[in-house]
Image: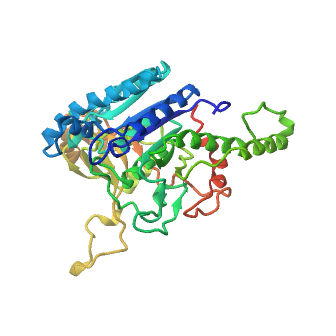
């Protein structure tokens, strides 16, 4: 991939991709190819991060046992993580490539300072030429502080390092409109412009070793693309596809925008430049089947992403439509706009922000229990760090800010949440423009890549 700018690439590997599901033995042939691919990308000037599952599976093999109680799983994770990293270090060591281990739980990034520390550590390792290997700390994690699966962790990691690409390696070539295992006529979905409007069969669960499945990969794709990361689902048994996919997609962007890896031409000969770029692309073979998720045109960055996806919500604050309009206009959340509170949370903890239509308050059903289908339902619009606890907000909801001290005996802030501590969910993250026709399920690769060049340019 010489001639292209240097990229940051995150590769996510599930347990079933690197560990045999029945014998729990590491799949050394695939692991070796993954290591060779990562090193090749690194030698081409790219920054590589690996998010790898497999600790519990390796622990099962080491202790010759089967999964059961939670406490035993945590112990197996401790045994397996050590051996998994030893295996990675041995394989990368043969190619003289240094690696580093990073273990995270959601609690580790719940504090803004710790989140930035994790960012800085990853950036420091990448600047040193090290390949970080990230995993969830299953030894310490409980349900309240788990990411849930490493698909989600890989998306958050990709956002933290401002990656250009996130590769979600799986046991199928790509996403299909139906389950290809049971439907031979399943149609591959090659390009996805909006995850929210996707029509695909994702009901299949993950393997017996993993916690994910195709549905968790779509969640990860939504998170990553919202942060401006081009996301790819492809088969894990042939990791060499990663370099081919990156090379092909980058060359397509160059060709569509009049650039190539050849020396630049004068500005007044743009048509010749485009023609040359097209000729350069003709010699490049199309990569194997995969699904590519295009990043958002206006990605959310850093603090906003951390508020939305780095924190676990401890409760819900319901607001009226007027407060929603104020937040959309960059104003803070005042107590007068709060309708109700749910859950138990303290000051400076994250909560969901849910807007309640004015007619919804009691009218959830008409007389005789008939549902009123004309009434809109509450809608989650974002997350916030609150200045008051659930009990305090419950007491000051609907009041003017000048009344807070009289009710509580103190007033830490006139706002329930400062605007800088509120991050709103974008509902229409991929608006239709004249350059894009209506999206069919199977979009030819070349038809969309040219219009997305600016989306992945995060330098």
Residue 304 left/right relative to 254? left
Quadrant of the image occupied by residue 93: top left
Vertical placement of residue 61 versus 43, above or below: below
Residue that protrudes farthest toward the right in the picture: 268
Vertical placement of residue 74 versus 193, above or below: above
Residue 375 left/right relative to 390? right
Residue 315 left/right relative to 16? left
In this orientation, does residue 303 appear? Answer: no
Residue 162, given in percent of the width and then of the height, sits at 49, 34
Quadrant of the image occupied by residue 153: top left
Quadrant of the image occupied by residue 107: top left
Vertical placement of residue 336 versus 112, above or below: below
For the rendered model, the colour scheme is: rainbow
Residue 28, given in percent of the width and then of the height, sits at 38, 36
Residue 3, given in percent of the width and then of the height, sits at 68, 31
Front-most of 251 and 164? Answer: 251
Residue 78 left/right relative to 280? left
Identify the image quadrant of the C terminus: top right
Residue that protrudes farthest toward the bottom in the picture: 368
In this orientation, does residue 76 appear? Answer: yes
Front-most of 282 and 200? Answer: 282
């Amino acid at each position: 991939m010489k001639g292209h700018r240097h990229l940051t690439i995150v590769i996510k590997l599930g347990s079933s991709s690197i560990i045999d599901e029945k014998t729990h033995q590491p799949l050394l042939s695939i692991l070796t190819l993954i290591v060779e691919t990562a090193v090749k990308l690194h030698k081409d000037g790219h920054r590589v991060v690996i998010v790898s599952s497999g600790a519990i599976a390796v622990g099962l093999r080491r202790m010759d046992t089967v999964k059961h109680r939670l406490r035993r799983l945590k112990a197996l994770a401790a045994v397996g993580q050590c051996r998994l990293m030893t295996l990675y270090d041995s394989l990368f060591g043969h190619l003289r490539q240094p690696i580093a281990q990073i273990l995270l739980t959601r609690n580790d990034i719940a504090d803004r300072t710790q989140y930035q520390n994790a960012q800085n550590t990853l950036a420091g390792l990448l600047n040193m030429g090290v390949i970080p290997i990230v995993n969830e700390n299953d030894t310490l994690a409980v349900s309240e502080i788990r990411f849930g699966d490493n698909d989600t962790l890989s998306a958050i990691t990709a956002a933290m390092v401002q990656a250009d690409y996130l590769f979600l390696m799986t046991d199928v070539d790509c996403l299909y409109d139906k389950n290809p295992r049971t439907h031979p006529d399943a149609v591959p979905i090659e390009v996805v412009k909006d995850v929210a409007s996707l029509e695909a069969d994702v009901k299949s669960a993950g393997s017996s070793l993993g916690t994910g499945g195709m549905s968790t990969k779509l969640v990860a794709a939504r998170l990553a693309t919202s942060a401006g990361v081009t996301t790819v689902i492809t088969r894990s048994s042939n990791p060499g596809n990663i370099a081919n996919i990156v090379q092909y997609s980058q060359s397509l962007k160059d060709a569509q925008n009049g650039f190539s890896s050849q020396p630049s031409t004068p500005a007044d000969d743009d048509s010749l430049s485009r023609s040359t770029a097209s000729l350069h692309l003709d010699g490049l073979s199309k990569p194997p089947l995969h699904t590519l998720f295009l990043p958002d045109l206006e990605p959310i960055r850093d603090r906003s992403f951390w508020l939305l996806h780095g924190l676990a919500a401890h409760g819900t604050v319901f607001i009226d439509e007027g407060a929603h309009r104020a937040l959309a206009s960059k104003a803070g959340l005042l107590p007068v706009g709060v309708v109700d509170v749910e859950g138990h949370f303290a000051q400076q903890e994250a909560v969901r922000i849910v807007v309640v239509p004015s007619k919804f308050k009691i009218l959830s059903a008409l007389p005789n229990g008939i549902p009123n289908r004309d009434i809109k339902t509450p809608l989650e619009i974002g997350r916030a760090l609150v200045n008051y606890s659930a009990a305090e907000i419950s007491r000051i909801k609907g009041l003017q800010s000048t009344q807070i001290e009289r009710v509580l005996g103190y007033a830490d802030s006139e706002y329930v949440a400062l605007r800088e501590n509120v991050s709103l969910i974008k509902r229409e993250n991929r608006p239709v423009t004249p350059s894009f026709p209506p999206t069919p399920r199977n979009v030819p690769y070349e038809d969309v890549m040219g219009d997305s060049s600016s989306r992945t340019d995060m330098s």
